[in-house]
Image (cartoon, rainbow, N blue to C red):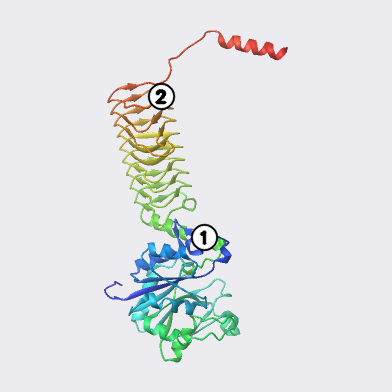
Amino acid sequence: MTRAQNPALAAIILAAGKSTRMKSATSKVLHEIGGRSLLAHVLATCDAAKLDPQVVVTSPDAKDVRGAATQFGARTAVQDPPLGTGHAVQAAGQALGNFNGNVAVLFGDTPLIEASTLLRMVEARNSGADVVVLGFEAADPAPYGRLVLGKDGQLEKIVEAKDASKEELAIGFVNSGVLMADATQLFDLLDKVTNDNAKGEYYLTDVVGLARTAGLSCTAIKCDESEVLGINSRSDLAAAEAALQVKLRIRAMESGATLVAPDTVFLSHDTELAADCWIGPHVVFGPGVSVASGATIKSFSHLEGATVAAGADIGPYARLRPGADICRDAKIGNFVEIKKATIEAGAKVNHLSYVGDAKVGAKANIGAGVITCNYDGFDKFQTDIGAGAFVGSNSSLVAPVKIGDGAYIGSGSVVTKQVDDDALALTRADHKQIDGWAAKFRARKTKKSGD
C-alpha cells in the first residue's frame, strides 16, 4: 500500500509515563536497543509506514524526550496532569492541527512493531472498519484486556482483566493498546469517555464500546506477541534487545551474509552486511557500519561508524572506531585500533597498533606496536603515510607528519619530521656494547646479597 492510496496518515505516540520501574535518570523511551532509542524505533516505523505528522505526547518535565522527538522531525504535546491514555491522546489534538485522515495511536515504549502491521491496520480501515485495534495471542493473557469478538467477527468490546467474567478470562486474544481510527471520529469518541472507574482516568480502550453504541464498526487484527512487547523494566529492555537481535540476524542472513555463530553476533539497527561477507563469532556492530561483499570480520572484533570494503580482512580482536574506512583487500589484524583513518587498498596493519586521524596509502605495511601520536592534549593532528611505505615495529609517528611513498621507517623510531619518498628514516640511538658488563654486574649483586 502506497502513500498515494492513503494520503492522510498520522501517528500519536504516547510517551508520558514516569518510567519508575526502570530506576533510571534517563527517560524510559530514550533507553536503547540495537543502538537506537525506543522512541526512535517507533518514529522510524512510522516513517516507514508513511505516517506523518507524528505527535509525541510527554509529561511536563520530559524536556529530553521532547528534544529527541524534535530531532526526528516529530511534533510534541504535553499531558498535564496525567489522566490516562484517552486523556493523553486528547492532549495531542492541538499539535495535530487541522489534520484530516487516519491516526494511529502507538506507544513510545513498544519499539518492535512493524511498519507492515500498521499498513494492515490501514487496509482494515479502508475495508470499512471505523476503529481498528491491534491484538495478539498472549502466552500469558492474565494482565491484558481481552478482545471480545461478536459472532460476525466484529470487535464488540475490550474488557480489562480485573473486570472480566470467567468466560472472558478464557479468551487468549488480548489488547496491545495500539489503535487506529479516523482522527475526527476518534476525538469525538474521546470527548464521550468518562473517568468513572477506580483510577479516575480516561481510558483509550473505552472508545471501542462507545463506537459500537454509536453504530460504528470495530475490528481487531492480529500480530505476533513479540511485536508489541512493552518495556517497563531493565528485564523488559533486555528481552526487547534479544528479540530485536533475532530479527536483525535473520534479516542479515536472508540477505546473504554468513554469520558463523549468529547467536553471538550483535548488530545495530542500521548495520549493513552485504551478500557473501563473512562474520565470525562474537562480533559486535555499533551504529553506522557497512560491510561489503567478500569482506571478512573475524571473532571478537568491535566495529562502530566504520566502512569495510570488498576483500578486506578484519580481526580477530580488532576495533574499528567511527571514521574508519577500510578499503579493498586491506588487512586489519589482532589488537589493532583504527579511528578516523583511511586504510587504502591492500595496506596492512597486522597487529598491536593504533592508527588514528590518518591515511595509510595503498599496500603500505604498518609493523607491530606502531602508533600515530595524533593528540597533544588539546588538538588532533593528521598523519599521512604514503603508498607502499614500510613502518617498522614499535615506531611512533608524531602528527602532523607525512611519510612519503615507498619510504622506510626503522623499527623503534620516533618520527617528528617529514620523510621523503623512498627514503629511510632512523631515529633510534646507535647500538653500544660493553663486553663482560653483565657477568660483573651479577657477581657484584651476588656478593652484596651474601654479606
Identify the amino acid type marked 1: Thr
Q: Quadrant of the C terminus?
A: top right
Say which element carries label 2.
Answer: loop
Residue 402's place in the image compared with 259, above or below, is: above
Residue 95's place in the image compared with 272, above or below, is: below
> Measuring 59% from the left and 85% from the top, which residue is drawn there?
165
Identify the amino acid type marked 2: Ser
Find the residue positioned furthest to the front. Answer: 378
Residue 151 in sight here: no
Tell me if 55 is positioned left or right of 147 in this view: left
Q: Position of residue 367 (x, y in %)?
A: 40, 29
Q: Position of residue 170 (x, y in %)?
A: 57, 80
Which residue matches tag 2? 413
Residue 167's place in the image compared with 112, above or below, is: below
Image disc number at residue 26: 1
Say which element carries label 1.
Answer: loop
Q: Quadrant of the N terminus?
A: bottom left
Q: Judge depth for marks 2 and 1 and give the one in front.
A: 1
C-alpha gap between disc 2 and disc 1:
48 Å
Badge 1: how crowded within 10 Å, few (<14), some, or many (20+)? few
Q: Earlier in the sequence, mark 2 or mark 1?
A: 1
Q: Position of residue 342 (x, y in %)?
A: 33, 40
Q: Position of residue 54 (x, y in %)?
A: 38, 70
